[in-house]
Amino acid sequence: MQWIVKQLLDECPELESFIRNHSKLFEQPIMQHFLSSPQARNIFIQSFREPTDANQQRLDDHFKSFYLDAQFTHYVSKTLYWTAIQYDQKRRKQRTRNPLIVDNPSVTDYTIAVEPDYSIICETLDVQSWSSNPRLSHALTKLTPQQKKILIGYYKFELTNQEIADQLNVSQQAVSRMRLATIRFLQNVMKEGTGND
């Protein structure tokens, strides 16, 4: 506040009594921000020195325009802030629901032979052919037809759990549980295999 008051008094010393009588007004952040602009200060001083209707209207219009801009900027900032938080929450939720096997720290004990061209991994509907690792291919043969359909839908066709559930006439939660259980089963098969090598 001190800077704004000093600036106003330097430009218009006759404002001193007005500022003293309306000190609360000059403590408001919106007023301080408004008067930090040289153009707004000039309009304010002119309307004080020459309090005509035209000058008062000019000051009112300038403040209304400034206030609308401030409100809009505040609204956009808040919207961006909450949108970013919601996006981050959505991504975290998706990461916890759909963990990548490669990102799983428990997988670092063993390696899986991965083809350099990932697009060919899911070219076929035969899940056994998705891996060149014999142990993993054998484990894939032990999956039930429904588990295979879920893996194919999720990894080959990139369907959501709800879309797969609609096709299989089961709940979305059942698809999610079965997919995660299948992944855990395959991870366990790979872990057991590394202990025997």
Image (tube, rainbow, N blue to C red):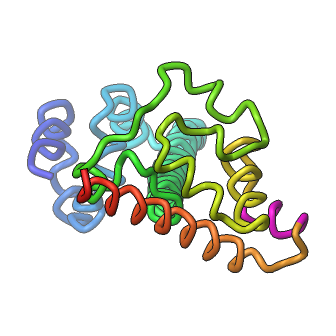
Residue 91, relative to residue 48: is it above or below? below
> Which segment is the magenta one?
161-167
Question: In the image, is residue 164 part of the stretch drawn in magenta?
Answer: yes
Residue 85, relative to residue 4: is it above or below? below
Residue appearing at x 48%, y 20% in the figure: 116
Instruction: Please indicate, yes or no, whether residue 148 appears anywhere in the rendered image.
Output: yes
| Camera-nearest residue between 183 and 55 | 183
Residue 9 location (% of width, % of height): 14, 40
Residue appearing at x 68%, y 46% in the figure: 127
Residue 145, relative to residue 135: is it above or below? below
Residue 78, relative to residue 188: is it above or below? above
50 vs 33, left or right, is right
69 vs 144, left or right, is left
Residue 143 location (% of width, % of height): 66, 64
Report which quarter residue 182 is drawn in: bottom right
Report which quarter residue 181 is drawn in: bottom right
Residue appearing at x 23%, y 59% in the figure: 195
Residue 19 location (% of width, % of height): 21, 56
| Camera-nearest residue between 83 and 41 | 83
